[in-house]
Amino acid sequence: MIDLELGNWKDFIEAMLRK
């Protein structure tokens, strides 16, 4: 996995948790 993909996945998880 590339860092960019990992960072994007982290943002997605944070958005779901915050929602």
Image: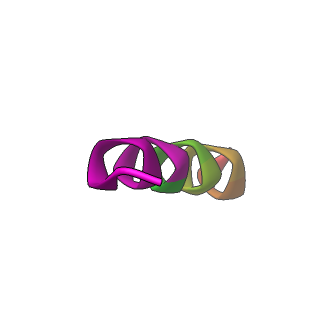
Residue at point 47%, 54% (across, down): 1
Residue at point 68%, 58% (across, down): 17
Residue at point 30%, 55% (across, down): 3
Expressed as whole percent of the image width and height from the top left, the position of residue 19 reads 69, 44
| Residue reaching furthest to the front | 1
Expressed as whole percent of the image width and height from the top left, the position of residue 11 reads 45, 47
Q: Main secondary structure of the magenta part?
A: helix
Expressed as whole percent of the image width and height from the top left, the position of residue 14 reads 54, 56
Between residue 18 and residue 3, name the one nearer to us: 3
Q: Residue 19 vs residue 3: left or right?
A: right
Display colour scheme: rainbow
| Residue reaching furthest to the left | 4
Between residue 2 and residue 12, name the one nearer to us: 2
Between residue 12 and residue 2, name the one nearer to us: 2
Q: Is residue 16 magenta?
A: no
Q: Residue 13 vs residue 2: left or right?
A: right
- The tally of labels here is 0
Q: In the figure, residue 18 lies in which quadrant?
A: bottom right
Residue at point 57%, 42% (across, down): 12
What segment carries the magenta color? 1-9
